Amino acid sequence: MTGETRDSADVVVLGSGCAGLAAAVSAAEAGARVLVLEKTERIGGAIHGGAGLFAVGTRMQRDRQIPLTRDEAFHRMMEHTQWRSDARLVSAYVEQSADTIEWLSWMGVEFSDVVAYYLGAQPTWHYREPDSPEITGVLADRARQLGVRLRTRCRARDLVTDAAGAVVGVTWTAPDSTDGPTRVDTGAVVVATGGFGGSPELIERHTGYRHGTDLFSFAHPELTGDGIALALAAGAAPGLTMMETYVCLPEPYWGPGGTPPELGSFRQPNLMVNGLARRFMDESVMRHPGYAANAVARQPGGHGLMILTADINSCYERDGWDFLMSKLPLTGPPDFDASVSKAVAEGFPHILRAGSVAELADRAGLEPDALRRTVEEYNQACRTGRDTLMHKPARYLRPVEDGQLLYAARFSVGGYGSLGGFAVDDLCRAVDSRGLPIPGLFGAGRDVNDLYGGTYPFVMSGNSTSFSYNSGRIAGRCAARTVPARGRRAP
């Protein structure tokens, strides 16, 4: 192995996803010489830029006469977490969000609409058409125009600190290389490595979920918490951690909202029971995937079983679904029975068909008398129009009559990825246990996002992706500003 080589940059960004590229472009626009280190072979990150971003106060919202204001959005987010999140960081994020849409649009990103995740939520999701350029691709092109060096297959190994604890460099190596590490001397490092959503070990350690058992997530294997570990080793205080969860059918039956469109009747407010055959939720909560996931996660084994009948599905075929996703092109089940039959024939264990309540209990592994009692209690609520147990609105009460074809789906908790890891302030500076900034160390994106108090706010959708872009912009801009102050010259 050869010895250490040296390099230099004003700002080094770890990671080339949404947050990393936003940081790199922002720092370069401020005049800094920027180097991006990406450990994989591809620039752009795990989600390739995302489908859209949260923002409030945009031109698109004004054109559509959407009345949500920045003040209202700020308070909704703070109330969602009962003021547990950093109010200054939330404010900085909300205030900048509209400008970020303009910033990306100027570069060539095409936002075609602004929608709500589900009907009744706030229209904050600025939607990018799938056939338009990936946002991270547009940012990467802009970064190259600004002279940013984008290096792939470069895994950061250590953050270099001086005697005062300031971050003054980073070392990296290439996988399977016989060369020694490269040290980059720098004025600032922005950690934006995408979190730990690809590491079952870290998921269980930080959140308690067991991947593949009570959590079925998009496990991008490269997301192993590398940047979080580096920041903590450099003195950053730990931040709150969570998974961005939603209720879903376990893999491979995924899709919008965790259920593929052809099985959308299982997304509706139908009877849901746990492994003890007991109701545990007002099923109308199914419209909010995050809240429904919380309810399911509390149950034995982290599962819930939704039950509906052929008659209920016929109502959906005639009248349409109760709940629709904004970008779902269907309003009712195209051929629900055929889709269920296909899943059953393929041996998918989480979708069931039965000719009676007793048969369904046997196939689902539930105690037959317990399920019968629950169905009778539920049907009584449907007859009277008054659900005294879970207080579900009467318009969603449809009986599960025995003796006809029954359908059931076993729901679990899904996850888009991890959120949080180490703490930052409202300038996205990493802070120590005293809340003081660590000179030269910044964080952005999923590595530092602890704004949601344990539950992702689907009511204002596009948030986690938008936070990545906006925190990246804040971190890159502030990192570039620190360079001259620390004795380095930006070009």
Image (cartoon, rainbow, N blue to C red):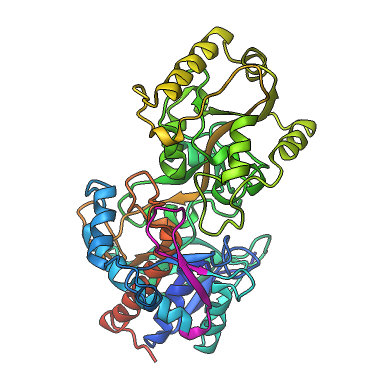
Answer whether residue 375 is magenta in the image. no
Numbered marks: total: 0
| Residue 88 spot, x, y in % from top left | 22, 62
The residue that appears at 37% across and 26% down in the rendered structure is 390
Q: Is residue 215 left or right of residue 116?
A: right
| Residue 444 spot, x, y in % from top left | 39, 64
Q: Is residue 62 left or right of residue 346?
A: left
The residue that appears at 55% across and 59% down in the rendered structure is 327
Q: In the rendered image of this protein, does residue 304 appear above or below residue 438?
A: above
Q: Is residue 14 visible?
A: no
The residue that appears at 57% across and 10% down in the rendered structure is 367
The residue that appears at 59% across and 72% down in the rendered structure is 134
Q: Nearer the viewer, residue 259 or 87?
A: 259
Answer whether residue 125 is magenta in the image. yes
Q: Is residue 255 visible?
A: yes
Q: In the rendered image of this protein, does residue 349 appear above or below residue 170?
A: above
Quadrant (top left, top right, bottom left, bottom right) of the N terminus: bottom right
Q: Nearer the viewer, residue 259 or 324?
A: 324
* Magenta-colored span: 106-127
| Residue 237 spot, x, y in % from top left | 30, 52
| Residue 99 spot, x, y in % from top left | 35, 78
Quadrant (top left, top right, bottom left, bottom right) of the C terminus: bottom left
Extreme-bottom residue of the structure: 491
Extreme-top residue of the structure: 369
Q: In the rendered image of this protein, does residue 385 appear above or below residue 371?
A: below
Q: Is residue 110 left or right of residue 451?
A: right
